[in-house]
Image: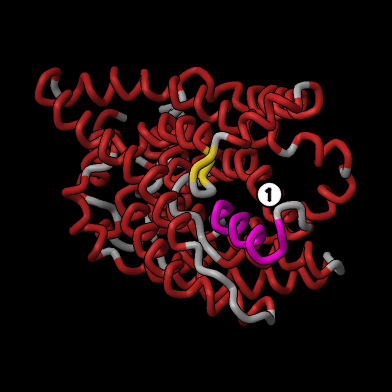
Amino acid sequence: MIAGHENGYRDNPALGWFEKYIYLWIIVAGMGGLLIGKVLPNVATSIESLSWQGVSLPLVIAMFFVMLPPMARVQLGELKHAARNVRPTIVTLTANWLVAPPLMWLLARIFVPEPEYRAGLILLGLAPCTAMVLFWIYFARGNLVQGVMVTAINAVSTLILYSPMGTFYLGIGGVPVPFVLILLSSVLFVGLPLLAGQLSRHWLTRAKGSEWFEKRFLEVLGNISAVALLATMVIMFSLQGQVILEKPLLVLRLMVPNLIHYATMITLAITVCRLLGCAYEDVAMTAMISSSSQFEVAIGTAMVLFGIGSGAALATVVGPLLEIPLMVTVAKLLRRMASRFAQTAATPVSLSHAQRSAVAVKVEKN
C-alpha cells in the first residue's frame, strides 16, 4: 500500500515531460535571463517598465499560466474539510508569524553587517508568500485546498501585522503597509487564475467529463505551465542580470542567510508535522508555506523606505532568485519521502475527502 502511495507522487508529473529534465531547463532559463540582462539591457529595461502599481505585468502574464493548473485542480467544495483540519493550519501560521521573522532577523545580523542589506533581508522574512507558493504545493502534491485557505489567512494577516512587525524588527517607525500591492498581488496572482481555473473545471467537466478534464486538459495545462515557469525565471534573472554579474560575491553572500532560512523553516515544518502524525499532503503544504516569502511586498517596501537603488532593495531580490530551484528540489525530496509520512499519519481526517478517495483508488490499483 505504501509503495503505491509513494509511486503516485513520483510518477504523475505536474509539468508534463518538462519535469524529467527540469534542472536543465532551470539552468538554461537562468543563463538566458542573465544573458538578456547583460547583452540586451534595453530589453530588460523595457520589461521592467511594464509595471502597474509596482506589479510587473510580464510577471502577471507568466504567473497566470503557472498558477492555472493548480487553481483548476482545486475543488472549493473541500474547503469545509480544510477548515476542520486545524493542525497543519496552526503549525503553518505559527511558523510564518512567530518563527520566520525572528529567524531571518538573527541570520541577517550574523551574516550581513551592512544595515541596508540587513534591512532588506529582514523585510523578506516578514511576510509569507500568498501566491506562487500554491504552485509549489501543487508540484509537491500537497493539500491545495488547505493551502488556499492558509494563504488567504496570511494575506489578511499581512495587512494587519506587516507594519508593526517591520517597525519592531527594523527598529524604525513608519514602516508602510503596501495595501494596494498586497491586494493587487492577491487578485492578479491568485484570484484571476482561481476564477479561470474554476470556470474551466465547471464548463469542461460538464462538456467533456471529469476524466477528460483531469487526464487530458490538465496534462496540456501542465506543459504550458512549465513554459510559463521558465519564462518567469527568465524575466526575474533578466531584471537582475547586471547586478548579479557586476556584484557576484555580494549576491552570493546575501544568498547564505536566505539558504539557511529556507532549510531551517522546511526542516522545522517537516519535523513538527511528523511528530503530530500529519498526512503527506499536509506536510508538503506546511513545508512550502512555512518557508515562503512575499517578495513583491518586501521589494516594494524596501524601495519606499530606502530608495529604488538601495542596498535593501537589492537584498530583497536575492530570495526570489533562489526560490524556483530550491522549491523544485524540496518538492522532489518530499515526494520521495511520501511513504514515511503515510506511515506516520495518525488519522485520515487530515486529508480532504477527494484526496482520501484518490489515495484509495491508487491503493486498489496497486
Q: Nearer the viewer, residue 362 or 134?
A: 134
Residue 232, horizontal then vertical, whole percent: 56, 32
Secondary structure that dominates the magenta span: helix
Report the span colored magenta: 294-307
Residue 22 relative to residue 15: left or right:
right
Identify the residue shown where x is 61% and y is 31%.
47
Residue 200 position (above or below residue 97): above
In the displayed structure image, the side of residue 304 where residue 42 appears, left or right: right
At a point 57% along the width and 65% down the height, the residue shown is 268
Q: Is residue 173 above or below residue 327?
A: below
> Which quadrant: the N terminus?
top left
Q: Amino acid at mark 1?
A: Val
- Image position, residue 156 (x, y; %): 37, 66
The answer to which of 74 and 167 lies nearer the viewer is 167
- Total numbered badges shown on the rendered structure: 1
Depth order, front residue of 282/253 = 253
In the rendered image, the residue lying farthest to the left is: 206
Q: Is residue 11 visible?
A: yes
Reading the image, the residue beneath label 1 is 317
Q: Is residue 33 magenta?
A: no
The percent position of residue 278, horizontal first and vertical second, equals 39, 60
Horizontal arrangement in the rendering, residue 33 relative to residue 58 (left or right) = right
| Observer able to see residue 292 | no
Q: Is residue 296 magenta?
A: yes
Quarter of the C terminus within the rendering? top left
Q: Position of residue 87 (x, y in %)?
A: 36, 68
